[in-house]
Image: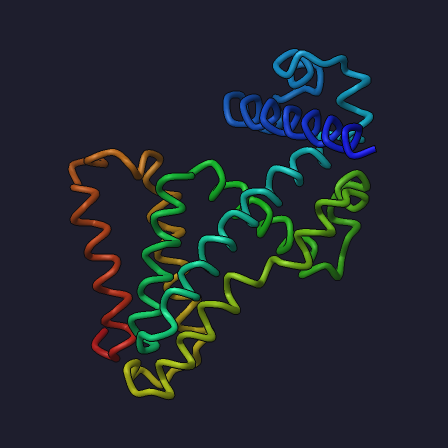
Amino acid sequence: MPTVISKNRDKEEAIIRAAEKVFFSVGYENAKMEDIAKVCDFSKVTVYSYFTSKENLYMALTYRALQQLIDILYLRWEKSRSSNGLEAFMALVEDYLNFCIKNKNYADLILNYLTIVRRTVAGEKLNNISEAMQNSIFYRKIKGIQNVPIDIAVEEIIRGQQDGSITDTKSPWVIHHMMWSMITGFVKVNYQPNERTFINADNTEWKLLLLSTIRGICLDKV
C-alpha cells in the first residue's frame, strides 16, 4: 500500500510540474489539459483521474505557491522571536519581497487567486466563479490558509506597537496593507523584478527605497 501511495504522489507531482510549465509559458486561458498530459508523458485520462478539471489543477499550483510563501514566513517568524517587533516585521517584509522577485509566477498565482476572492465578495457570491472552481478541493484548501501571511505580519506589527519599536499608531492592518500594496505594485509593474533595471530605474535602488519607505511608515516618518 505505501508503494501505491508513493507512486500516486509521484504522478500527482509530475502533473503539477507539467502544469506549471504549461501555465507559465502560454497562460492559463490558453493552456489545455492535452498539453499538460504531453509534457508529463501521461495520457489525458490519467491527468483527469488526478485532477478533474483545469481549474482544479490551477488551484493546486496556487495552493503550492501560497504554502511555500507561508513556510518561508513561518521560518522567519521563528528566527525573529528575539528581535523587536519592527525588525521582525521588516524581516518578514524582505522575505515576502524576495519571494515575489524570485518566484514572480507564483506571486502572480497568489494575486490572481485574491482577484477571485474579490470577485466572490470574500466567498459570499460563489455564482461569480465557475462550478469547477467551486468544486476544486484545492480552492477549499486555499480558503483555509489564505489569511495566514497577513496574520503573521500583523502579529509582528502589533508586537512592535506594544514594545515601542513601531511608533505609528495606525491600525496594524492598514500598515500591513500599505506594505502589501507597495510590494504588489513593484512586482506587477516590473515584469522582470529580478533584472538590474526597469525602464531606466535601477531595481536595487527601487527595492531599497521601497523598504526604507515601509520602515518610515512604521516609524511614523512618512
Q: Position of residue 202 (x, y in %)?
A: 16, 41
Vertical position of residue 133 compared to residue 19: above or below? below
Residue at image coords 57%, 21%: 22
Q: Nearer the viewer, residue 163 or 128?
A: 163
Q: Position of residue 197 (x, y in %)?
A: 19, 36
In the visual, does 204 lie left or right of 52?
Answer: left
Question: For residue 94, which quarter of the picture?
Answer: bottom left
Vertical position of residue 197 compared to residue 44: above or below? below
Question: For residue 31, which quarter of the picture?
Answer: top right
Q: Position of residue 191 (x, y in %)?
A: 35, 35
Residue at image coords 51%, 61%: 149
Q: Nearer the viewer, residue 151 or 135?
A: 151
Q: Position of residue 91 (x, y in %)?
A: 32, 62
Question: For residue 23, which quarter of the picture?
Answer: top right
Total number of numbered discs in the rendering = 0
Residue at image coords 82%, 17%: 45
In the visual, does 210 lie left or right of 20?
Answer: left
Colour convention of the picture: rainbow
Residue at image coords 34%, 69%: 88
Quadrant (top left, top right, bottom left, bottom right) of the C terminus: bottom left
